Amino acid sequence: MRLHIDPKIEQRFFRALLWLLTGVTVFILFFIIFYVLKRGLPAVSLQFLTKNPVEMGKAGGIFSTIIGTVALTLLAVLIAAPLGVGSAIYLTEYTRENWITRVIRFGSECLAGIPSIIFGLFGFILFVTKLGLGWSLLSGGLTLAFMILPTIIRTSEEAILSVPYSYREVSFSLGGTKWQTVTRVVLPSALPGIATGVILGVGRSIGETAAVIFTAGSSLHIPNSLFSSSRTMSVHFYILAREGISMSNAYGTAAVLIIAILAINVVAYTLMNRFMRKYC
Amino acid sequence: MDKTVIRAKDFSHFFGAVPALKNINMEIFQNEIFGIIGPAGSGKSTFLRALNRLNDLIPSSRTEGTLEIRGQDVYAPGISVVELRRRLGMVFATPVPLPRSIFENIAFGARLAGEKSQGRLAELVADCLKKTALWEEVMDRLETSALKLSGGQQQRLCLARILALKPEFIMLDEPTSGLDPISTMKIEETLRKFRAEYTIILVTNNTKQAARVADRTAFFLNGELIEVDRTDKIFSAPSDSRTNDYISGKFG
Amino acid sequence: MTRLERNERLIRLALLLVAFSAVSILVVITIFIFGEGTPVMFKYGLKKFLLSLDWFPLEKSYGLLPMIIGSLFVTAGALVIGVPLGLACAIVLTEFSSKGLRRILKPVIELLAGIPSVVYGFIGVVILVPFIRDNLGGPGLSVLAASVILGIMILPTIISISIDSLEAVPRSYREGSIALGATRWQTTRMVMFPAAKSGIIASIILGMGRAIGETMAVIMIAGNAATIPRSLLDPVRTLTSNIALEMGYAAGEHREALFATGVILFIIIMVLNTIANLTSKRRAP
């Protein structure tokens, strides 16, 4: 004999259960943000943002770490984005789909999933030690660039492939060359997807700790060249928290990090929306 | 005197080992509307794409024989494919407006060719839209997205788009197959008006459309040219029995 | 030939160089990691490497078993927490709530994916670890703590990709089911969910990959004892923490052993990705 439950009662039960679980999830996720912001925002002031750390971070601000974060992220994106988007363009528009492109795609996907600590290890051995670059913005930037490159290639490829073939045909039939077709039709349509990949890369670079500690070091001085060591906000936060140097400054750093990431995502979203409205 | 502008001499077109066009011998005259009819897969679209070398995009594509436009072999080495495609405007079966404004759609081809002056572009856009009878309908919303137009309007937009390049030939590949009767009629009217200025090649799977609009009509079957003649003769007394069978609907 | 057409060949060459550089980088990374890591593995034998319990690098004993088990436990725990919560959220947001709510919540959830892992780890240390220690016993730094925090960390991944998969199911499926008299829950359970299955599985596998690869948060809350944990409350060390903890001072063969750990992780990720690819390709016709 099969137990027959009235579907309406079954629905009411599961609906309640699902909403409960969802509520728990949303609560947890929001709680984390609010907890950090609540404890961290009091520590954040103009002073905090513009003064350098004093006494290993016990006092003062986080200015040099902000510079370090920006410099490292910028370097990583400047290296990885052109390389990644260019490769994606070549692989999708200038070659036929064959086993080589499939292997490259699979390889990119795997590398996109490799834990960042392995990149840290790789960067440490290759850049810091073997190439003699030492703990520096260059070592860190290159490592981060290598880390986000696979993601950028992958998302760019997907974005480019999702542009309808008919658009390209129209461009060709109107006398467009391949490069004109790529730059005037394919890339504008693929831009939201490509931008997502780049922004993911930016977000990952900003929050990255494991790969950065072992390649860019943790110097508290403002970096004055590509070869200076530098500390990012994430690393600073980690050190402050782990060593128990200053809880309030730790929270403050975390708050700044979260707000920065929030701001970047919001800006990215609005830019993309405006872009899509213009082109669609 | 009918002047030949397009001449196919023993022209064959292969995709790998598969022949899509076999030994086509055909002439198209200046300022006529040349219709091409035939069942699906007979090579009609392939012929159009061979003319503007759009088939080059397919890696396995290969040709034999010659295809000449005003005496010049289209497949000769060193030919500028870009200039060729500007001379042969093509309208596809499904209207494909680009995801941009109406203005930018029409200006697209001109910009590809290097036109930068906003003033000249504005003139060009207005001119093309007037020619395709779209101007009245869209003149106050040129900056809005072309995707918001109706199907018939979109197809007229595609027609206006190629006019911006001042082509000599207009090629249409089943242009009204997805459109309602009124839009179809509007496009056919436009084509009749265009005959004076352009040479028009119209591929259609609607034999009645060919009967209405084309001066001469060619019948393709399985990649071969079966028969080509004045439209009224093709439809009243075709020389080949296969033509007769197709037109009377025995197969299709 | 126009000038533009002549330039095409140069452009093509330039792009080829770019693609070649990018691909070489990917190849170099792979070769490097395997190159540094595999000699050690074969020197001591794969069996000893993977199955020995003793990780005493200073005495040349490189047994990774406790860390392998550690990674497995912690990842499994993360899935136990992350998958039910994540899927519930995804289902509610696509099938049982308004489009407006989804449009607001989805970006916010994706935003949470960007929070640095060290912040999650920190929250774990400050709130979760004392809670476990005071209420459940043990040092607090435990498998449980790591599982909970990792589970929370993979929620955004699972939620957002599952939402995408569910949204991609053709509306006609849902409409057809409702037209036959099914309730919304029945429709979800019997029609929408199975149709989105491949995407949902892919999201879970991606979450799994993220959990396995997490380093900093785990270091902060898992205790890092290189022994096999016997209960949820015991401390544990994962493969990734192993590398991070010892990299600072490892030299010579010890360092190569850490690379070998990296090789194992690489292979695990490769296997996961292959599975993810295969499941997502097997779409219903």
Image (cartoon, rainbow, N blue to C red):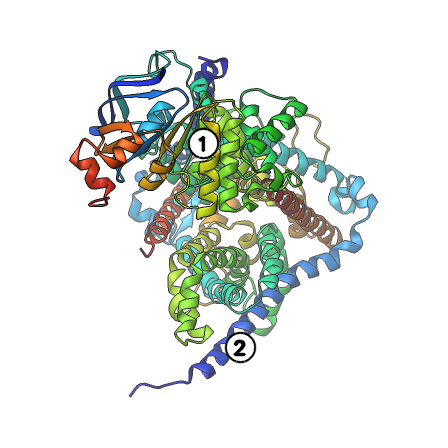
Do tag 1 and tag 2 residues touch (Cβ < 8 Å)?
no
Residue at the image point whose x is 59% and y is 70% from the top: A23
Q: Chain of mark 1?
A: B
Residue B85, percent from left and from top: 43, 22
Please state which of the two labelled residues, at mark 1 or mark 2, is closer to the viewer.
1
Quarter that holds the N terminus of chain A: bottom left
Considering the numbered disc 1 on the image, is that residue within a helix, a strand or a loop? helix
- Point out the image quarter for the C terminus of chain A: top right
Residue C27 seen anywhere in this rendered image of the structure: no
x, y (%) of residue B69? Answer: 36, 16
- For disc 1, the neighbor class at 10 Å (few under 14, some 14 to 19, many from 20) is some
Is the residue B160 above or below the residue C247 in the image? Answer: above
- Give the residue type that dot 2 points to: Ala
SS of the residue under disc 2: helix
Q: Nearer the viewer, residue A113 or C130?
A: A113
Q: Which residue is mark 1?
A: B192
Drawn side of residue A49 relative to residue B144, left or right: right
Q: Compute the Cα span from label 1 to label 2.
A: 67 Å
Residue positioned 39% across, 13% down in the render:
B79
Q: Residue at x 51, y 27 (%)?
A: B163
Q: Is residue C196 left or right of residue A231?
A: left
Residues C60 and C201: in front is C201
Query: Is B151 or B57 nearer to us in this picture?
Result: B151
Q: Quadrant of residue A50?
A: top right
Position in image of residue A14 (x %, y %): 48, 76
Check residue A16 in the rendering and tell me which mark sits there, or answer none: 2
